[in-house]
Amino acid sequence: MKLTLEVWRQRDAASPGAFETYEVADATAEMTLLELLDRLNDQLVEQGREPVAFESDCREGICGCCGVNVDGRPHGPQANTPSCEQHVRSFADGEVVRLEPLRSAAFPVVKDLVVDRSALDRVIQAGGHVAVDAGTAPDADTTRVSYETAEMALDFAACIGCGACVAACPNGSASLFTGAKLTHLATLPQTRQQRGARAVAMVDQMEHDFGPCSTFGECAVVCPAGIPLSAIAAVGKERMRAFLRGRAS
Amino acid sequence: MTDPTTTRADTASCTPDDVRTLGTPVDGRVPDVPAEQAWDDRRLHYPLVAPANRRKFTVIVVGTGLAGAGAAAALGELGYDVECFTIHDAPRRAHSVAAQGGINAARARKVDNDSVHRFVKDTVKGGDFRGREADAYRLGQESVRVIDHMNAIGAPFAREYGGELATRSFGGVQVSRTYYTRGQTGQQLQVAGANALLRQVARGTVTLHTRQEMLDLVVADGRAQGIVVRDLVTGEVRAVTAHAVVLATGGYGNIYCKSTLAKNSNATAAWRAHRRGAYFANPAFIQFHPTALPLMSQWQSKTILMSESLRNDGRIWVPARADDDRAPEAIPESERDYYLERRYPTFGNLTPRDVASRAARERIDAGFGVGPLKNAVYLDFADAIARLGRETVVARYSNLFHMYEQATGDDPLSTPMRIAPGAHFAMGGLWSDYDMMTSVPGLFVGGEVGWGYHGANRLGANSLLSACVDGWFTLPYAVPGYLAPLLGTRVLPHDDPAVLEAVEAVHARTERLLSTGGTQGPDRFHRRLGEILYRYAGVTRTPEGLAQGIAEIRALREEFWRDVRVLGEGAELNQELERAGRVADYLEMAELLCVDGLDRDESCGAHFRADHQTSDGEALRDDTTWCRVSAWESPAPDAPDARFVRHDEPLTFQAVPLQTRNYA
């Protein structure tokens, strides 16, 4: 099938960008969105034109590298699916598809479809970790963790850090991302120790780079890991808890 | 540096003697005590660095996967000054993230008769007696606290209803020692490790450099003293010097192009280190994962992996009649061949990966393959659903089923999955001694970039374990043991001739890639290289095929340096340039891979030579000649008749006597 691609081209962070239009005449239904870009790039290289820069790595939906806006929607038309698992079968023959980087003030464009998402890691660095050094951990079987608790923690720990939630939010909020990590670590008994301090540190850092939660819920619709929308509530809840109880626990 | 255009005569009929010579043996420096005491003994003898002196040592860690993040974080926790590098935008992206099924640990809490010794036996036997027994012991012994540690730093392991850690069974073992978190064990461990690394960044012990690629190793006075990196965003090339360098840069399975690895997984750091003197061990030992998705179209970029854990409940079969075009549901039970259960009744669908891959390949090649391209076998959950109920099966494998459905459009609950062997894990890697140190003093390895544990075949769920053990519980002992005598020495100044030479070599190579001005992008060469390797160095190999492979790889490499087209510039984000450099290294390494396969005149584990098999098609080892590691040195640059040099490390087995692998 034939697809017309309007692709955002931008040389670097300092340069202005613009859409350029390309045609891929031999797209097939089973191609992924990223394989479509591979095909386009092969074609561009053949023509002596610079290929489109875009990020991808595992291509099985777990590394969180990929992420492009497709017709304004982070990752693509299929809900809760990363760009690498979006398929050309979602498009109609002859369709015009617009590809641009994940859009957010917190994610400056590096080149073409590549953005800088290091603001997410700054949130983790501020407190999304556990103060246990190698070799000092107690026996993992000593603290019993109920099946339900482990499963709930896993629901929130599934975040792949792609940043689609931020790009989907009209406010550019990272509440789903931050709330998922807070909930994951607050749910497990072995990681609860610094709960209060962690909440304050992470939320403060989050507010430095990202906007406030819009409560619209677009984030959960695009999230490839299916993080429950209740994660956004954890941001306020965990910080309020820290405020009322003191930072320590 | 080497001149990769060096071409030698067409040697399509070459013998091992045409392509290699024998060098002096290498010493694994295993403690001279019973294997189960080796690690205790060695730890006792490592010199220590006092806490106040640790910050005086700079250690470079390349890679932030389970091994790299673990080593960097643990060394940071101890107080060393760590410089950590990753090609990714964030440490969490490293490919450890994609491992699905689980992590083994010989915790032996149940009464299924597991033990550290049994773990070692399974690992050594699973590796077909081509790994180092003492290393396997260390792996088993440290496995216990790996689980404790990863649990403590936030990995939400699956739990039983009573609250204890849940386990499952994996291929090649008869006990249940695999700890897991749904089908995303790698992700949960990786994120926990990356977060622990960021904790050290916040503390100031680790400096993290994202989007930086190591392109050369600095060796001075016979020691690894630094690396040369390229900033992938600005293109800036610079040297970083240190007292020791740890490579945790993963395996080279992506050399096959269509593999289960991530698109950015590459062998460049390892290969550059090899070119600087680090021997390469057993490069032909590459595992083909039996449960990858088959190729379905020309532009498919990889063979997506489906976790081996699926083989716990899925049954593998092909139609009993060749070229049977009926839908799987239309084929009655009596006309199906559950070939693994038939050939290996004891282990059934849970035979080790090499055995399962070979058996699948055999059926596919014999015309029994299924799917539109007849290149797959079925993995069927109908019986499991009937036995356990749909809900239980979904609970166990929901995200894998979802992933399969995403990729293929088929629902595995209603129709069998189609799977096929895909290039996956590299058992081979940079050779290291028992202390994880390569043949270049001061250069250490951790995780898949190394070689020691898995012999000629890795057991499922042992890779996450080996990466975690290396990172958290081996390198933090071994690296200080190397550093201690260096107290008071400074890192190499950046105007040292060795530094300048390495930086200049990187510049020259980059310039050459950009100025070749050919007609084909690097991806095209990569795809062709992958086809050559699958054909001649795949699941089954022959001496003639490997010789042909060597000739074709040389020709392709020559064509690459004549006709590669790398658009864009050096001083910018240039993914095409990144790819070109990695493919250029693959084109060198692929030759060595085939040379090793040609040279190793036996079948063992994943290295199956058609000329060495039993009458019923099983691998035939030659322990008299080949019970050893081949540690390779590549020929000096610009020498047309140069041959690869093989250094041997003999392998001895004390605790697990040499025996024929038998999974029937």
Image (tube, coloured by chain):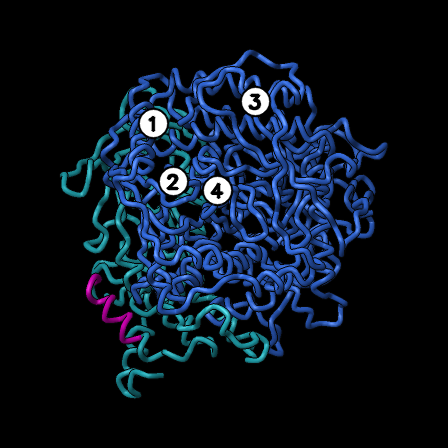
Q: Nearer the viewer, mark 3 or mark 2?
A: 2
- Report the residue marked by disc 3: B643
Q: Residue at x 50, y 23 (%)?
A: B528
Task: State which tag comes first along the sequence, 1 or 2.
Answer: 2
State which mark lies toward you, 1 or 2.
2
- Given this view, does label 3 or label 4 mark the residue nearer the observer? 4
Residue B440 has which mark? 4
**In this orientation, which residue lies closer to the viewer: B560 or A18?**
B560
Residue, disc 2: B220
Quarter holding the N terminus of chain B is top left
* Mark 3 to mark 1 CA distance (whole Å): 23 Å
For residue B38: magenta? no
Q: Secondary structure at mark 2?
A: strand
Task: Report crowding for label 4: few under 14, some 14 to 19, many 20 or more residues within 10 A (C-alpha).
Answer: some
Q: Position of residue B3 (x, y in %)?
A: 41, 22
Chain A drawn in what color? Answer: cyan
* 2 and 4 marks on the same chain: yes
Query: Left or right: where does residue B385 sit relative to residue B266?
Result: right
Q: CA distance from mark 3 to mark 4?
A: 21 Å
